Amino acid sequence: DAKTTQPPSMDCAEGRAANLPCNHSTISGNEYVYWYRQIHSQGPQYIIHGLKNNETNEMASLIITEDRKSSTLILPHATLRDTAVYYCIVRVVNSGGYQKVTFGIGTKLQVIP
Amino acid sequence: GAVVSQHPSRVICKSGTSVKIECRSLDFQATTMFWYRQFPKQSLMLMATSNEGSKATYEQGVEKDKFLINHASLTLSTLTVTSAHPEDSSFYICSAPPGKGIQGALHFGNGTRLTVT
């Protein structure tokens, strides 16, 4: 799996958009970008994923640069409940099975009232 | 959506005893499950991959005789911490993909907080 780099921590004011960057400059053409988050003392929660097009769901938007070397997770209106550690992961998904997923240190997002 | 149930959520045991943690996929079949361990203020560390009907694959540095994994059915994987010691105190999390070849994400249990006294 390609290595990712994320800032260790970020703050965001409640109600504002939270933009979490991720650098994955060595990503391969068949690797997807996945985002998870982990609220304290809980299991990680899947947020969104994409290959090269921008994606949006009810939780967030994912913006992937044209060269795919970086991406940004956007929480459009951050709430206090969005305070968590956010993990960016890149990996291959193939029909031959499911590869293991390894986590980096992630970004600790603190939403401030 | 796919749900992974992990039990117990919290356990306290005495040093030298064994503890079993169960991980169930509730509405899908999981031929593969992953077990992670997380120490305070650290990221998740993959311990092993369990495969239904075959032996688990352990990551480097993880003692397979201490952390016994059994994936007996398509919906259940168990992790047994044998002869637990205080240094085994940690947050253990299981996860499973929703299906082979599906472009989906891993689904995680809510974790088990193990405290060994």
Image (cartoon, rainbow, N blue to C red):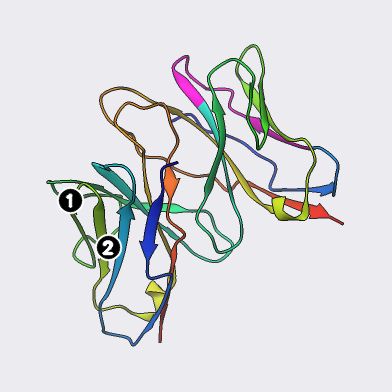
Mark 1 lies on residue? B73
Chain letter for mark 1, please.
B
Asked if residue A24 is among those painted magenta in the image, a careful observer would answer yes
Instruction: Of the two numbered discs 2 and 1 on the same chain, state the one appearing first in sequence.
Output: 1
- The mark tally for this picture is 2
Chain letter for mark 2, please.
B
**What is the spatial separation of the Cα atoms under label 2 and label 1, in whole angstroms?**
14 Å
Q: Residue at x 49, y 44 (%)?
A: A103
Residue B69: horizontal and vertical position, in percent?
22, 59
Q: Residue at x 53, y 47 (%)?
A: A45
In the picture, the disc for residue B79 is 2
Give the left or right position of residue A25, taking residue B26 as reference. right
Q: Which residues are magenta?
A: A18-32
Q: Which residue is at the front of the view, A92 or B85?
A: A92
Give the left or right position of residue B24, taking residue A68 as reference. left
The three-letter code of the residue at mark 1 reads Ser
Report whether residue B61 is seen: no
Residue A84: horizontal and vertical position, in percent?
66, 53
The three-letter code of the residue at mark 2 reads Leu
Residue A15: horizontal and vertical position, in percent?
85, 45
**Quadrant position of residue B111:** bottom left
User: Badge 2, how many Cα within 10 Å: few under 14, some, many 20+?
Assistant: many
Q: Which residue is at the front of the view, B104 or A31?
A: B104
